[in-house]
Amino acid sequence: MRIPRFYVTEALSIGQEFTLPEGTFRHAMQVLRLKVGESLILFNAQGGEYQARLVLAGKRTAAALIEGFSPLNSESPLHLTLVMAIVKPDKMDFALQKAVELGVATLQPLITQHSVVRIGKEQTDKKVQHWEGVVQAACEQSGRTCLPPVLTPLTLEQWLQQPFAGTRLILAPGLFPRINALPLDLPSPFALLIGPEGGFTDEEVAQCQQAGVVAVSLGPRILRAETASTTALALLQHRYGDI
Ligand code: SAH
């Protein structure tokens, strides 16, 4: 069986008897039902991961002895922000999970003209917290050693106003170049914009192009937003990253 991995925020060191924080405790004990003596991996996104063994498994508390450290780095050399229009919750979760597996560095939810799902100010924090949970679980599962931040949602105008030194791409169906036709020496970091279920409006695509964002196409078929993001990320990792 795969050794379960847990993200924690605390500092970790070899030889330490580490009391599992509440969320980790619930996941490890109540969901995975780990027993004393079983192995687990802890990481805190400060680089590498720690091998640990459960030494205490009580009803309310559990502790793991940290036995080793691996300075492994599973992060991609492609530094990419996925600027993802907010889509329906299950699709958004899927897109974010796959984006983490595919090595994105940062997640920027985007509000566009055709966003079907609109979230009020009061709901935004809850949404972001939920997405952070999706990202954390995907990091734990996929062996990532960093936790991509989920930024506060922005409108397209707000996002375009932000300075960005690198390459910005917008995915839009149409007669735009394919990802494999992009020059290999484009400056890093990258940002990739994906539209919502209803797509970007022509005006939004034009607005992006005027701001220097490069429009790219994924070919003649219309993909759902979550398929488009997953596909484009795989292609970009293949061309500029580590796939
Ligand atoms: N009805 C919309 C489709 C939206 S699909 C339209 O015709 O525009 C959701 C998003 O996925 C799009 O906004 C775009 O960012 C991306 N996408 C889907 N298929 C694509 C393709 N063939 N090429 C480029 N981007 C695509």
Image (cartoon, helix red, strand yellow):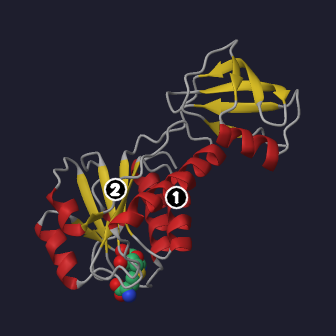
Q: Point out the image quarter for the N terminus.
A: top right
Q: Residue at x 52, y 50 (%)?
A: 243
- Residue 219 can be seen, yes or no: no
Q: Residue at x 31, y 52 (%)?
A: 190
- Furthest toward the top, the residue is 15
- Residue 91 can be seen, yes or no: yes
Instruction: Say what amino acid the circle numbered 1 marks.
Output: His
In the rendered structure, the answer to whether residue 156 lies left or right of residue 52 reads left
Instruction: Say what amino acid the circle numbered 2 marks.
Output: Thr
Ligand 1, image quadrant it occupies: bottom left
Question: Which of the 4 quarters of the picture holds residue 183?
Answer: bottom left
- Find disc 2 in the rendering and name its residue: 152
Q: From this view, report whether residue 189 is shown above or below residue 218.
A: above
Callout 1 crowding tier (Cα within 10 Å): few <14, some 14–19, many ≥20: some
- Find disc 1 in the rendering and name its residue: 130
Tell which circle, 2 or 1, labels the residue nearer the N-terminal end.
1
Q: Is mark 1 within 8 Å of ligand 1?
A: no
